[in-house]
Amino acid sequence: MRIYTRQGDKGLTRLADGTSLAKDDRRVETYGAIDELNSQIGLLMAEIPADETVLLAELILLQQELFDLGGELAFSSEAQEASLWQVNESWTQRLEQQIDAYSAQLPVLRNFILPSGSRAAAQAHVVRTLTRRCERLLLGLNREERLNPAVLPYLNRLSDWFFTVARYLLVSQGIPEVLWVKAADRR
């Protein structure tokens, strides 16, 4: 099978249901951002210590789920229906349970923190911000087209999950969080 089709040479792509769209269409931009997010999760995984087997397994599951989400988005608005949708409320509930479990191991958050401390924690923050961008793109697409209603809560919780994991990565390695200091106090 050839990897190239030459269809994109004219700025078009074909959705899973055969619909042809411009490559800069909002739907294509949105599932492209999901793909970028998934790639950045792969980079995060490369920075996580191998002994963090539970966390690495959770990240692989998230990559699988994001691929499922991209698959949903690869169908036109007209093809969107419940039988196609994979993202569901139980995914969001699982993220909430994991956030609670990681949070139980963290100090109480009393200040804003800066995305730094270690490569893994900083990359978790990159993934968090990309998740927020995907959420914004999905929100815009949802205003114009039909989407799975479980997608927005899932992505919203996913960004919280990556924030929590960034903090966990620092605490588990004994690295202090870098706190934001108000401009007036930085003198």
Image (spheres, rainbow, N blue to C red):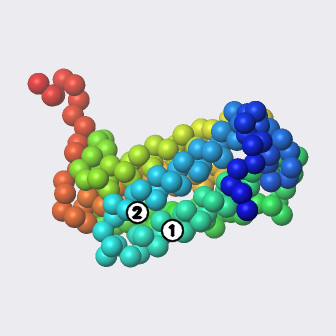
Q: Which of 149 and 68 is in front in this view?
A: 68
Res. 5 in view: yes
**What's the residue at 86%, 45% (across, down)?**
19
Name the amino acid, label 1. Ile
Question: Dot 1, how many residues are within 10 Å of its Cα: few (below 14), some (14-19), or many (20+)?
Answer: some
* Image quadrant occupied by the N terminus: bottom right
Q: In this view, does 120 lie to the left or right of 40?
A: left
- Marks 1,2: beta carbons within 8 A: yes
State the residue position of label 1.
Answer: 60
Q: In this view, does 175 lie to the left or right of 37?
A: left
* Image quadrant occupied by the C terminus: top left
Residue 131 image position (x, y, % from top left): 52, 47
Question: Dot 2, how many residues are within 10 Å of its Cα: few (below 14), some (14-19), or many (20+)?
Answer: many
Secondary structure of the residue carrying numbered label 2: helix
State the residue position of label 2.
Answer: 45
Residue 172 higher or lower than 26, as above or below:
below
Outermost residue toward the left in this view: 187
Res. 25 in view: no
Residue 31 higher or lower than 180, as above or below:
below
**What's the residue at 76%, 33% (across, down)?**
10
Residue 186 image position (x, y, % from top left): 15, 28
Residue 110 image position (x, y, % from top left): 27, 47
Q: Is residue 113 left or right of residue 38?
A: left
Residue 161 image position (x, y, % from top left): 46, 57
Q: Distance between the residues labelled 1 and 2?
A: 9 Å
Secondary structure of the residue carrying numbered label 1: helix
**What's the residue at 41%, 70% (across, down)?**
55
**What's the residue at 68%, 55% (across, down)?**
3
Residue 117 higher or lower than 90, as above or below:
above
Q: Nearer the viewer, residue 96 or 26?
A: 26
Name the amino acid, label 2. Met
